[in-house]
Image (cartoon, coloured by chain):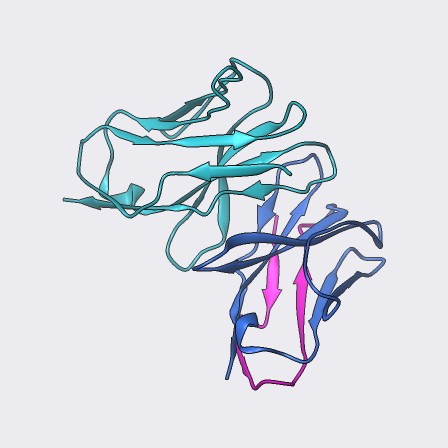
């Protein structure tokens, strides 16, 4: 079945460092890909998405490119801030019935 | 526009009891999905309802059930609770494929 694998955390970085969180997926069709973020004590929020190969999703300085050839959707940010500390989930959806499959999440700590 | 509202936010039950969790979606959203979040298994899909019909179901035992009402509000029920059911239960509503999550109901089973 479909699955999402993302790098284990926690990831600890200093403020203004470059961030990469790796994500790869397995799917039978052509899924849409997502990154969700969960801040402490809150539910998940959609951070960015891409719906087809070579699409780049971006939001709040974060970017991820849908790479079909490597089945990857790595999350990047050029300069992280303390406020980016959260848990990040990579996810995919195969169809339009709103079933989304999530990776296990990567906890990110940004030190001032 | 009000967000997704889940009640109760926190609850404690003992093994063998049953629990009902409630979710009020964003106004106008007809799809409601439920997820279980645990440290070990991460986020796992429970089921999804659209216009009062269960459209998708994850790999959970029959003790986990749900329903959706005509106003799109949804409830999920877990019967005969086990220690392993302790988790954060998240509800999400959708109208165009993007999921909007509530803050969750944290269930502790003792």
Q: Is residue A84 left or right of residue B10?
A: left
x then y, percent, for residue B74: 74, 61
Question: Taking the image as drawn, is residue B10 in sight?
Answer: no
Of the 4 image quadrants, the one containing the N terminus of chain A is top right
Q: Is residue A61 left or right of residue B18?
A: left
Q: Which residues are magenta?
A: B1-27
Q: Quadrant of residue B96?
A: top right
Question: Taking the image as drawn, is residue A26 in sight?
Answer: yes
Q: Is residue B93 left or right of residue A78?
A: right
Q: What residue do we see at 84% from left, 49% from top?
A: B51
x then y, percent, for residue B60: 68, 60
Instruction: Please determine whether, in this image, residue A71 is positioned above or below residue B53.
Output: above
Q: Residue B22 lies in magenta, yes or no?
A: yes
Chain A shade: cyan
Q: What residue do we see at 66% from left, 28% from top?
A: A28
x then y, percent, for residue B24: 68, 59
x then y, percent, for residue A45: 49, 44
- Note the chain letter of the blue one: B
């Amino acid at each position: 079945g479909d699955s999402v694998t993302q790098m284990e955390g926690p990831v600890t970085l200093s403020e203004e460092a470059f961030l990469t969180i790796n994500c790869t997926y397995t799917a039978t069709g052509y899924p849409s890909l997502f990154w969700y973020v969960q801040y402490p004590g809150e539910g998940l929020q959609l951070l960015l998405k891409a719906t087809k190969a070579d699409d780049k999703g971006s939001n709040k300085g974060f970017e991820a490119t849908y790479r079909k050839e490597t089945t990857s959707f790595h999350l990047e940010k050029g300069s992280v801030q303390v406020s980016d500390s959260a848990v990040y989930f990579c996810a995919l959806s195969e169809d339009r019935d709103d079933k989304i499959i999530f990776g296990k999440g990567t906890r990110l700590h940004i030190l001032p | 526009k009000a967000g997704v509202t889940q009640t109760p936010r926190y609850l404690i039950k003992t093994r063998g009891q049953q629990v009902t969790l409630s979710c009020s979606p964003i106004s106008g959203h007809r799809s409601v999905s439920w997820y279980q979040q645990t440290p070990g298994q991460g986020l796992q899909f429970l089921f999804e309802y659209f216009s009062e019909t269960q459209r998708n179901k994850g790999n959970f035992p029959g003790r986990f059930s749900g329903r959706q009402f005509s106003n799109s509000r949804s409830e999920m029920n877990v019967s005969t609770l086990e220690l392993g059911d302790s988790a954060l239960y998240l509800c999400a509503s959708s109208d165009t494929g993007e999921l909007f999550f509530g803050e969750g109901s944290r269930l502790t089973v003792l």
